[in-house]
Image (cartoon, rainbow, N blue to C red):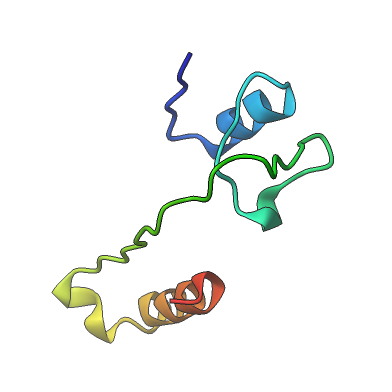
Amino acid sequence: MVLESPSNQAIKACVEAGLAVSLIDRSGVTEAMQILNDLPEIAEHEIVFLRPPASQTDEAVSLLAQAMQKYFRV
């Protein structure tokens, strides 16, 4: 069975209920979840932050981009 959802809460609920396995950042792991260490390593992947040209001078968008770069260490 596969669950695809735009809702992180729905995915987390399924994982917490023991109905799913998911890739979740360690900061999002709750006490109801179990980290599985015996799975294969995750392949290298990209995180892409797209912003329209009009937002290049928007300070809030720039700060968000900086925070994401720091958080994801990109």
Most distant residue in the left direction: 53
- Please give left or right for residue 22 compared with residue 44 in the image: right
Q: Relative to residue 63, is residue 28 depicted above or below? A: above
- Please give left or right for residue 20 compared with residue 72 in the image: right
Instruction: Determine which quarter of the picture holds residue 32.
Output: top right
Q: Tell which of 9 and 32 is nearer to you.
A: 32
Instruction: Determine which quarter of the picture holds residue 59.
Output: bottom left
Which residue is located at x 34 percent, y 61 percent?
46
The quarter of the picture where the C terminus appears is bottom left
Residue 64, given in percent of the width and then of the height, sits at 45, 74
Count of all numbered marks drawn on residues in the image: 0
Q: Relative to residue 18, is residue 74 depicted above or below? A: below
Most distant residue in the top direction: 1
Residue 26, given in percent of the width and then of the height, sits at 68, 55
Which residue is located at x 15 percent, y 75 percent?
53
Residue 41, given in percent of the width and then of the height, sits at 53, 50
Q: Tell which of 34 and 42 is nearer to you.
A: 42
Q: Relative to residue 37, is residue 73 depicted above or below? A: below
Which residue is located at x 54 percent, y 43 percent?
40
Most distant residue in the right direction: 31
Instruction: Determine which quarter of the picture holds residue 60.
Output: bottom left
Residue 50, given in percent of the width and then of the height, sits at 25, 65
